[in-house]
Image (cartoon, grey):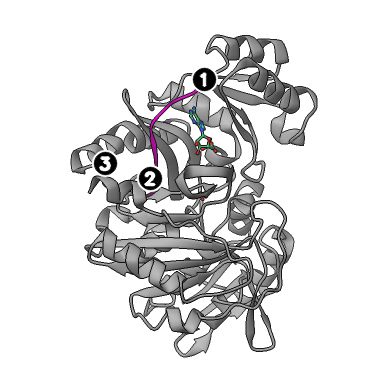
């Protein structure tokens, strides 16, 4: 089969790397891809990076009509929200990911909030508003302790966590009155503020069956001990010790099964992966948000541990045959440490020479996924905020963590910034 992957981050590098191991695949393109992706081999030939942006739907369609991939796999949220799946389907092109209606779980927080209430999915108390006064009064009912969320996609910046009315009113005003997020903030969701450990759930879905992954945990704040501004994610590990087998079954029953029943009732044909971000509170597990795609950097650890042929699973999502598959995971654990450019998530410089990737990958249980890299001659240089996802596998979480940091310590670029405490919360209780 010939496969086109859409996206350019560490998540897409992990997807391409894993797909490249499938004996079914003879050729792979990635649009736009990145330097690391272009070095992956399929049957001895490099994956071809195609210079078309992930949001340039017309050009992607034109490319697919000309090159005729047997399957297109979508990584990021924006093309899904823009309706790339519907567009490709209209042209009889096989594409993996939720259609536009299904992608609303991520592209509209108001839609998700109302859906969770309707189908009894445990979630924070919340309501949808378009009016400043009403939203402010609702926030006041929580004493200002609330999360204020722009309805639409806002580059990961559309959520303000507030602990008093001053912050709450400012956030509501910024979104609803000043339109800080444009159309994405025409509607907002105000939710009670919850406390607890946050983890990521992922489940593949074919519209009828959902297969839940083990839990993973992202580290969103930029600095150790969860200090500093929020980022796209500074590191992950899998599995976490926070949900045991019974807890995972409970999550399947109260979140995934109810969600799937709701999808069926609402005639949402969800084929792809659903990624609920959840919080473990003293009143049980609650969904903070849904994402309609693989997490980044969760994918890097998941696909390192997944033993199944990824292509077969993706095809099963489209064929409606996921019930014939069982997910198989390597025993042990994987850890991914993100190495970012100095200054990220604020402004940062690009073009710093990266050394040590080959040395880091001398350990056969280490893989360095590229996110923001480019080539300058034959040298790897930095080309984005999140630069590398240094991922290691071992039979225990402690050993995986040690191997990941040993690899990180071999990689150098000016201003490199990473957290030293990925998986520390888990190691403390294990
Ligand atoms: P979201 O994009 O909805 O997951 O929100 C981004 C981040 O805001 C989450 O990862 C949480 O850390 C925080 N957050 C969102 N909603 C809540 C809530 N209701 N209570 C506490 N923290 C929240
Ligand atoms: N892990 C954060 C995200 O993918 O949104």
Give how far across and how far down residue 278 sits, in percent.
41, 37
Q: CA distance from mark 3 to mark 2?
A: 11 Å
198 magenta-colored: yes
Rendered position, 216 above or below 286: below
Name the foreground residue: 392 vs 79.
392
- Name the residue: 25% across, 34% down: 250
Residue receiving disc 2: 201
Mark 3 or 2, closer to the camera: 3
Tags 1 and 3 touching, CB below 8 Å: no
Q: Is mark 3 within 8 Å of ligand 1?
A: no
Task: Using a 10 Å C-alpha cutoff, classify the residue at mark 2 as few (fewer than 14 neighbours), some (14 to 19) or many (20 or more).
Answer: many
Q: CA distance from mark 1 to mark 3?
A: 25 Å
Q: Is mark 1 within 8 Å of ligand 1?
A: yes
Task: Using a 10 Å C-alpha cutoff, classify the residue at mark 1 as few (fewer than 14 neighbours), some (14 to 19) or many (20 or more).
Answer: many
Q: Earlier in the sequence, mark 1 or mark 3?
A: 1
From where the camera sits, is residue 93 visible? Answer: no
Q: Looking at the rendered structure, which numbered label has been put on residue 9?
A: none
Q: Looking at the rendered structure, which numbered label has been put on residue 126?
A: 1
- Name the residue: 57% across, 61% down: 417
Residue receiving disc 3: 243
Taking the image as shown, residue 335 lies to the left or right of residue 131, namely left
Give how far across and how far down residue 48 sits, in percent.
60, 80
Give the structural element (helix, strand or loop) at label 2: loop
| Residue 371 falls in image quadrant | bottom right
């Amino acid at each position: 089969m010939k496969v086109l992957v859409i996206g350019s981050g560490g998540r897409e590098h992990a997807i391409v790397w894993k797909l490249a191991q499938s004996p079914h695949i003879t050729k792979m393109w990635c649009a736009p891809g990145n330097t690391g992706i272009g070095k992956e081999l399929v049957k001895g030939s490099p994956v071809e990076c195609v210079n078309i942006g992930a949001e340039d739907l017309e050009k992607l369609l034109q490319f697919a009509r000309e090159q005729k991939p047997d399957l297109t796999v979508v990584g990021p949220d924006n093309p899904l929200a823009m309706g790339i799946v519907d567009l490709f389907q209209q042209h009889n092109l096989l594409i993996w990911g939720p259609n536009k209606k299904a992608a609303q779980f991520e592209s509209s927080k108001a839609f998700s909030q109302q859906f969770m209430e309707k189908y009894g999915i445990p979630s924070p108390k919340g309501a949808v508003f378009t009016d400043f006064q009403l939203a402010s009064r609702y926030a006041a009912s929580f004493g200002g302790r609330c999360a204020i969320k722009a309805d639409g996609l806002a580059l990961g910046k559309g959520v303000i966590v507030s602990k008093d009315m001053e912050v709450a009113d400012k956030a509501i005003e910024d979104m609803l009155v000043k339109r800080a997020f444009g159309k994405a903030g025409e509607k907002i969701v105000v939710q009670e503020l919850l406390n607890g450990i946050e983890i990521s759930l992922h489940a593949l879905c074919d519209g009828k069956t959902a297969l839940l992954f083990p839990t993973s945990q992202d580290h969103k704040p930029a600095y150790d001990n969860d200090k500093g501004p929020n980022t796209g994610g500074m590191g992950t590990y899998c599995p976490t010790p926070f949900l045991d087998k019974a807890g995972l079954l409970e999550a399947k029953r109260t979140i995934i099964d109810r969600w799937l029943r709701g999808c069926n009732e609402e005639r949402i044909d969800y084929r792809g992966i659903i990624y609920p971000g959840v919080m473990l509170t003293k009143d049980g597990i609650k969904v903070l948000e849904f994402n309609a795609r693989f997490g980044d950097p969760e994918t890097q650890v998941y696909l390192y541990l997944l033993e199944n042929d990824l292509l077969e699973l993706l095809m099963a999502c489209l064929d409606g045959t996921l019930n014939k598959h069982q997910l198989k995971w390597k025993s042990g654990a994987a850890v991914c440490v993100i190495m970012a450019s100095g200054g990220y998530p604020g402004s940062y410089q690009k073009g710093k020479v990266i050394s040590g990737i080959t040395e880091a990958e001398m350990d056969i249980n280490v893989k360095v996924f590229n996110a923001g890299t480019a080539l300058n001659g034959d040298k790897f240089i930095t080309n984005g905020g999140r630069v590398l996802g240094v991922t290691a596998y071992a039979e225990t979480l402690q050993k995986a963590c040690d191997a990941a940091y040993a690899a990180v310590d071999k990689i150098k670029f000016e201003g490199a910034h990473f957290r030293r405490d990925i998986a520390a919360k888990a190691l403390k209780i294990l």
